[in-house]
Image (tube, helix red, strand yellow):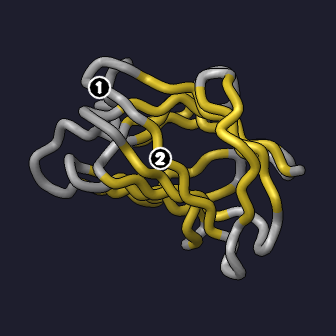
Amino acid sequence: MSVVKELLRAEGNGTLSFGDYTLPSKTKMDNFEFEGDIYKVKTFAEITKLEKNGMFVYESVPGTAVENFRATAGEIVFQVSAANDVQFTLELEPDSEYEVYINGETAGKMTTNLSGKLSVSTELNEGESAGVRILKS
């Protein structure tokens, strides 16, 4: 999987792609309009963060490239790549249960905290990507 050199782009299939974990210093793009919402991304080797209308959506440590990100009321789907193992956090519904799948395999059920944050870790190597699917239970 390649990094997103534009930092944030709309794909033809109605999804978003964002992040460039190869950047040595923090770079951002804001005021990106997509389907009536305004997005902002900050990304570099240490962190990638996506906001929608000023609200937290996604954050990873270290930085990642995310492709085909789609979030609906009951499901979030995307491909993530990084230089090595990564932990990402998503803003979902508070105190709710979700089934997490990595590359089609279940990683188990996880519950968000009172602020709606769900953190997931996955093992990656440079040049690898993982398919992530999160379903509300």
Residue visible at 43% across and 40% down in the picture: 18
Q: Which residue is farthest left?
A: 24
Callout 2: few (<14), some (14-19), or many (20+) C-alpha neighbours within 10 Å?
some
- The local crowd at label 1, few if under 14, some if 14 to 19, many if 20 or more residues have their Cα within 10 Å, is few
Q: Is residue 6 left or right of residue 22?
A: right
Q: Which residue is mark 1?
A: 125
User: Can I make out residue 50 in this image?
Assistant: yes
Q: Give the amino acid at mark 2.
A: Ser
Residue of label 2 = 121
Residue 38 in sight from this viewpoint: no
Residue 38 place in picture, x, y as percent = 58, 59
Q: Position of residue 83 (x, y in %)?
A: 25, 33
Residue in the image at 27% along x and 35% along y: 84
Please give the name of the residue rendered at 79% of the width and 73% of the height, measured from the top-left corner: 95
SS for callout 1? loop
Q: What is the distance, in whole Å, between disc 2 and disc 1 at their CAs?
A: 13 Å
| In-image side of 129 versus 110 (left or right) | left
In the picture, measured across the screen, residue 120 lies left or right of residue 137, that is: left
